[in-house]
Image (tube, coloured by chain):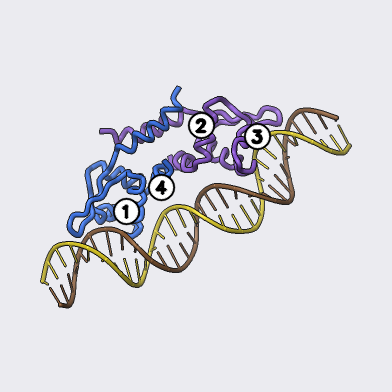
Chain colours: A purple, B blue, C brown, D yellow
DNA sequence: TTAATGATTAGACAAATATCTAAATAAAAT
DNA sequence: ATTTTATTTAGATATTTGTCTAATCATTAA
């Protein structure tokens, strides 16, 4: 829960998630879409993975990142207690 | 959106929200339930208010904080784009 | 009007965070 | 084998954050 909110508390990381809606992408392809250095994006991806918001698969020299939406259920569950 | 995620990215602030589910409470009553100083809780309440997650009404020398759940719709809306 | 109570503001400080460059690792291409 | 490409790790740094104590503001009570 902590890792989840932490991961979401950054506009760049949220933007990465939104980009991944279009489908899995390599670390490099993701980094290209932002003005930050590759190590910075790599770090953001690490935090997203710690929160289980993305998964990564190594494919040759590339690392492909995939959105994992199942974690949102946890968030929805937390939100639900506040409804009504 | 930034203020919202920022406010939620702290366990104490999330706990405050959960306590407020029981009903509006004064700043002092909220602070009593935590081990932090009154100024610290006051600061957390300020961030929650900046995110519009709570509203405050001054009643004499007390300040009553009330949970505002309408903001969660914004969060749900953001989450919704990831569904399916 | 003075003292007490509830709450916030101000300022300080340690810890966490986001970013960078440089270096390291691993795979592919020459 | 060597070099290039993709990515991560390491280390540095400036900013942000959570906390505290002390001081201030505002309201109520003596």
Residue B3 placed where, x, y %? 40, 45
Give the distance between the C-alpha atoms of the residues marked 3 and 2, in whole angstroms: 16 Å
Helix, strand, or loop for circle 1? loop
- Mark 4 or mark 1, which has the lower sequence index? 4
> Disc 3 or disc 1, which is closer to the eye?
3
Q: Nearer the viewer, mark 4 or mark 3?
A: 3
Residue for badge 4: B10
What chain does badge 3 belong to? A
Pointer 1: what residue? B34
Tell me if mark 3 has few (under 14), some (14-19) or many (20+) residues whose alpha carbon lies within 10 angstroms of its own. some
Q: Is residue B19 left or right of residue A58?
A: left
Label 4 marks which chain's residue?
A: B
Q: Are marks 4 and 1 in contact (CB under 8 Å)?
A: no
Q: Secondary structure at mark 4?
A: loop
Check residue A18 in the rendering and tell me which mark sits there, or answer none.
Answer: 2
Q: Is residue B14 above or below residue A78?
A: below
x then y, percent, for residue A66: 56, 28
CA–CA distance between discs 4 and 1? 14 Å
Q: CA distance from mark 2 to mark 1?
A: 36 Å
Gap in angstroms between the C-alphas marked 4 and 2: 23 Å
* Residue count near mark 1 (Cα–Cα under 10 Å), binned few <14, some 14–19, many ≥20: few
Residue at horizontal 22 percent and vertical 51 percent from the top? B57
Whether discs 4 and 2 lie on one chain: the answer is no
Return the chain for callout 2.
A
């Amino acid at each position: 829960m902590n890792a989840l909110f932490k991961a979401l508390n950054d506009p760049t990381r949220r933007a990465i998630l939104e980009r991944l809606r279009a489908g899995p992408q390599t670390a490099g392809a993701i980094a290209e879409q932002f003005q930050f250095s590759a190590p910075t994006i790599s770090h953001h991806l690490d935090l997203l993975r710690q929160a289980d918001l993305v998964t990564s698969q190594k494919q040759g020299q590339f690392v492909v990142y995939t959105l994992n939406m199942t974690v949102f259920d946890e968030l929805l569950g937390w939100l639900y207690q506040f409804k009504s």
